[in-house]
Image (spheres, helix red, strand yellow):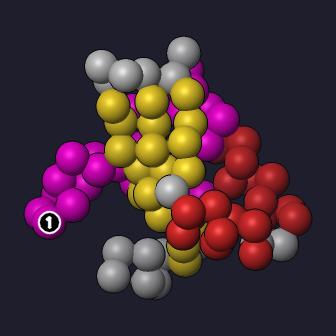
Amino acid sequence: MYNIRFEKRAADFFRKLEKPIQERIGKKIENLKTNPKLGVPLTGDLVGLWKLRIGDYRVIYQIKENELIIYVLKIGHRRNVYS
């Protein structure tokens, strides 16, 4: 089972979300512990990262298989999460 670690900006954004949205995103992130490749691999400049789609929000994360850690790098609205 993988451990989840949040980068500061991802944790800050997560805390500012409304409670129902936090719960939806939190459940999906918890699912990554047992299935880290649940998301979609990114391409181009973001190769090596993965995205998880939760409604209009995206979670950008990195899988460190040798350490069994998932780093949640960014959480944001789909419109601006990649910038």
Of residues 1 and 78, the one nearer the viewer is 1
Residue 45 in the image: above or below residue 67: below
Which residue carries the number 1 mark? Answer: 45
Q: Position of residue 44 (x, y in %)?
A: 12, 63
In this view, which residue lies farthest toward the top? 1
Where residue 17 sits in the image (x, y, percent)?
76, 72
Left or right of 74? Residue 43 is left
- Looking at the picture, how far across and down is residue 15, in whole percent? 75, 67
Residue 28 forms part of the magenta stretch: no
Q: Is residue 42 magenta?
A: yes
Up-down relation of residue 67 to residue 28 (above or below):
above
Q: Which residues are magenta?
A: 29-55
Residue type at the position of mark 1:
Asp
Residue drawn at 62 percent across, 32 percent down: 31
Picture quarter containing residue 30? Answer: top right
Name the quadrant of the C terminus: bottom left
Figure check: 39 above or below 56: above
